[in-house]
C-alpha cells in the first residue's frame, strides 16, 4: 500500500505531496503541529492533542482550517488510506501562502497537511526493556540569533506587534534591558554626544551584511563607532536612531515606543550615512 498524504483538501501520493515555496511554515516556521499515537485504530490522547492544537493556533492567531469534527474525520481517512492501525498521525497547520513579509498577511488561508506512518509496538517494547541513554545540553531555544535560520516565529510575532502599534519595526531587548536587534534589521543609535553605537557581533544578533558594510564604510570615512550594547533607555534618549538591512539599507527612525527622537525628522548623521551607503551601492 503506497503512502498517501492529505494536503489542503486533497489526498495525494506521499511522494508528490508538497506545499508552495511561499508557505509561511516553510519561510518562517509560522505554524503549529501535533503528533498523535495510534494504537489498535485508536487515537491516543486525541482530545488533549486537539485541545493543544486549538490553543497553539489561538496563541498565534492562525485561523482553524476546519472544525474539530471534520478534522477528526480527515485524520481517520488518512489512517484508513495508509492502512495504519498502529502508528502515528502528523498534522501541521501554517498561516498559509503569502508574499514574503514578516507581519501577518491579511488574506492568507491557513494550510493543513497530514501524514501517517506505521510504527511497531514490538520495537518500542524492546527499547523499553533495554532502556536508553540521554545527555544534557544547555537550553538555547533559541539563543543562536547569529544563525540566519528560517525559524523566525518570534521575529514575526514581534513584527506583527509593531504593525499593530503602527510601527515599522520592533527593536528587541534582552533580559538585562539591552537592545539586541530589530526583527529583520540591526539597530543603531547616535547618542547626545554624537557617538555612533551599535551592538557587537555575538549570538544575540544576526551579523547583518548591511551593518558590516556600513562599519567598513565608516572606517574609510574615519567616522568613529562604539561597538557595545545600549539600553532601551539610551535608545529612548538617543539623538538619532536608525536601522540597517538588505531591504531597508540605512533607514532613519524618528519615533521609538511613541517617543519622538530628535525633532521627529531623520537626523543629519543617519541621513548622511544613508547617502554614503547609497553611493557605495551605486558604485
Ligand atoms: N533580514 N537581523 C535579522 C534578524 C535579520 O533577519 C536581518 C535581515 C538583519 C539584517 O541583515 P542584512 O543586513 O544582512 O540584511 C538583521 C532580511 C532582510 C529579511 O529577513 O527580510
Image: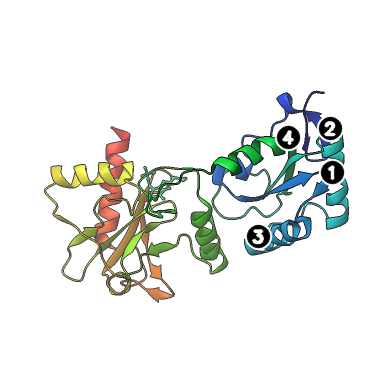
Q: Residue 221 appears at what percent x and percent y?
A: 14, 46
For the residues labelled 1 and 3, the Cα–Cα distance comes to: 26 Å
| For marks 4 and 2 on the same chain, the one whose residue lies earlier in the sequence | 2
| For marks 3 and 2 on the same chain, the one whose residue lies earlier in the sequence | 3
| Residue 268 visible, this orientation | yes
Give above or below for 15 relative to 154: above
Q: Secondary structure at mark 2?
A: loop
Residue located beneath label 2 in the image: 83
Determine contact: label 1, label 3, CB under 8 Å.
Answer: no
Residue depicted at 15% across the width and 69% down the height = 193
Determine contact: label 4, label 2, CB under 8 Å.
Answer: no
Residue 41: assigned label: 1
Q: Residues within 10 Å of mark 4 (few under 14, many from 20)?
A: some
Give above or below for 182 relative to 129: below
User: Along the line of sight, which residue is nearer the eye, 226 or 116?
Assistant: 116
Q: Residues within 10 Å of mark 3 (few under 14, many from 20)?
A: some
Residue 160: assigned label: none
Q: Secondary structure at mark 1?
A: loop
Of badges 1 and 3, the one in the foreground is: 1
Residue 117: assigned label: 4
User: Along the line of sight, which residue is nearer the eye, 145 or 132?
Assistant: 132
Amino acid at each position: 500500500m503506497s503512502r498517501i498524504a492529505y494536503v489542503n483538501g486533497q489526498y495525494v501520493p506521499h511522494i508528490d505531496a508538497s506545499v508552495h515555496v511561499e508557505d509561511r511554515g516553510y519561510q518562517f516556521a509560522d505554524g503549529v503541529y501535533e503528533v498523535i499515537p495510534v494504537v489498535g485504530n485508536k487515537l491516543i490522547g486525541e482530545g488533549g492533542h486537539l485541545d493543544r492544537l486549538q490553543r497553539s493556533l489561538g496563541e498565534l492567531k492562525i485561523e482553524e482550517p476546519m472544525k474539530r469534527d471534520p478534522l477528526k474525520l480527515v485524520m481517520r481517512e488518512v489512517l484508513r488510506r495508509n492502512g495504519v492501525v498502529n502508528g502515528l498521525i502528523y498534522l501541521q497547520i501554517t498561516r498559509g501562502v503569502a508574499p514574503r513579509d514578516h507581519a501577518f498577511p491579511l488574506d492568507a488561508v491557513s494550510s493543513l497537511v497530514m501524514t501517517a506512518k506505521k510504527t511497531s509496538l514490538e520495537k518500542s517494547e524492546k527499547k523499553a526493556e533495554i532502556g536508553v541513554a540521554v545527555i544534557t545540553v544547555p537550553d538555547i531555544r533559541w539563543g543562536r540569533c547569529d544563525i540566519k535560520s528560517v525559524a523566525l516565529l518570534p521575529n514575526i510575532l514581534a513584527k506583527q506587534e509593531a504593525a499593530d502599534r503602527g510601527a515599522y519595526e520592533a527593536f528587541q531587548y534582552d533580559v538585562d534591558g539591552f537592545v539586541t536587534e530589530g526583527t529583520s534589521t540591526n539597530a543603531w543609535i547616535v547618542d547626545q554626544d554624537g557617538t555612533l553605537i551599535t551592538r557587537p557581533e555575538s549570538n544575540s544578533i544576526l551579523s547583518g551584511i548591511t551593518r558590516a558594510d556600513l562599519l567598513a564604510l565608516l572606517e574609510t570615512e574615519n567616522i568613529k563607532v562604539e561597538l557595545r550594547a545600549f539600553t532601551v533607555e539610551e535608545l529612548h534618549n538617543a539623538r538619532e536612531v536608525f536601522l540597517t538591512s538588505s531591504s531597508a539599507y540605512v533607514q532613519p527612525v524618528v519615533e521609538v515606543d511613541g517617543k519622538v527622537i530628535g525633532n521627529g525628522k531623520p537626523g543629519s548623521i543617519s541621513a548622511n550615512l544613508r547617502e554614503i551607503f547609497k553611493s557605495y551601492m551605486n558604485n
